[in-house]
Image (cartoon, helix red, strand yellow):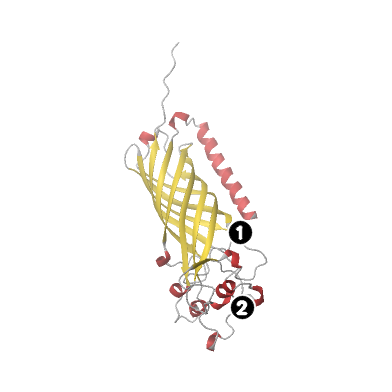
Amino acid sequence: MKHFFTFTLTLLFAVTLVATQANAQQFSKRKQYNSVGVSLNAMNYFGDITPKPSIPSLRFGATRPNIGVSFTHRFAPRVSARAAIAYGRITGDDAKAADQNDPDAKYRYNRNMNFRNDIFEFSAVGIFDLIENRNNYLKRPDFVPYVFAGVAAFHHNPKGLVSGGNIPASLEAGSYVDLQPLRTEGQSSAYSKTLISIPFGGGVRYKINKSFDVGFEIGWRKTFTDYLDDVSGNYAAPAALGSDASKYFGRDITRSTSGEFTGFNTPGEMRGKSNEDDWYIVTGLTVNYILAPSIKSPKFR
């Protein structure tokens, strides 16, 4: 959390400095303008249920859609601020991500964890254009690369698919179950579903005509949780897992506990990699419509 506040303060200082400098150079209000945008994106995740248990490993087959709308205000020749809401899904599945023939990955294949997580996000970011525009929106450059960073709040809800392993009678094969209430690692309290993240990344924007821009953007989300996939620490003792559903997703979804996997889910054995938080990434296209600023006629006396 300390790093979050340090980063945020640094970002705000940088944006303020640039905006102040631009203001000193008389970027008038009549050159400022707003735009609204619609985005269609692809969403991926970095975490414990990926081909390798490290960032930036991801499985492109797990890509899911994300849609969003945004409002942007241009303050200065290079500086804009954008507020956006977006909704999308991330997924992971050991059966598809881990190679059962790999000496290391076969243990994650045997772990047999899976999840899907629908994420609703509200973000506010500062955008810094690498090519400035000192004119009004009509004379903006045709092609502009940019970088951005800011802060976001998001709500997530990981769910697990009942598939394989020792399925109890209380669960239906093929159904999805909310994982957070199950406390699948024997946690004393459930992790939060509403959190903050740090969005940052870059993109390019292309002018189609006087009113429309189209852009391509890639953005990473640094989260402060290791539970986007409901996998983080060690296997819990059966007594710490109250319901049949908790025991199933916490321990019994495992493919085998015999042979080379003897003791695989023994309490205290590693279930996930707890020293790295999960990330998600959003990549896609945005169409922006510029809201032409009204021009006030001078008053004659």
Q: Residue at x 59, y 84 (%)?
A: 263
Residue in front for this viewpoint, 73 or 230: 230
**Residue found at the far left of this picture:** 209
- Cα distance between the residues tagged 2 and 1: 24 Å
The number of numbered discs placed on residues in the rendered structure image is 2
Q: Position of residue 290 (x, y in %)?
A: 39, 37
Classed neighbour count for the residue bearing mark 2: other residues with Cα under 10 Å, few (<14), some (14–19), many (≥20): few
Q: Position of residue 85 (x, y in %)?
A: 48, 48
> What's the mark number on residue 157?
none
Res 237 seen here: no
Image: 138 above or below 112:
above
Q: Residue at x 48, y 63 (%)?
A: 45
Image: 186 above or below 154:
below
Residue under circle 1?
192
Res 294 quadrant in image? top left
Residue under circle 2?
269
Q: Position of residue 15 (x, y in %)?
A: 54, 42
Q: Quadrant of the N terminus?
A: bottom right
Q: Position of residue 194 (x, y in %)?
A: 58, 55
Residue 189 in the figure: left or right of residue 144: right
Classed neighbour count for the residue bearing mark 1: other residues with Cα under 10 Å, few (<14), some (14–19), many (≥20): few
Mark 1: which secondary structure?
A: loop
Res 60 quadrant in image? bottom left
Image: 234 above or below 11:
below
Residue in front for this viewpoint, 75 or 287: 287
Mark 2: which secondary structure?
A: loop
Work out whether mark 2 precedes mark 1 in sequence or the reverse, and give the earlier one: 1
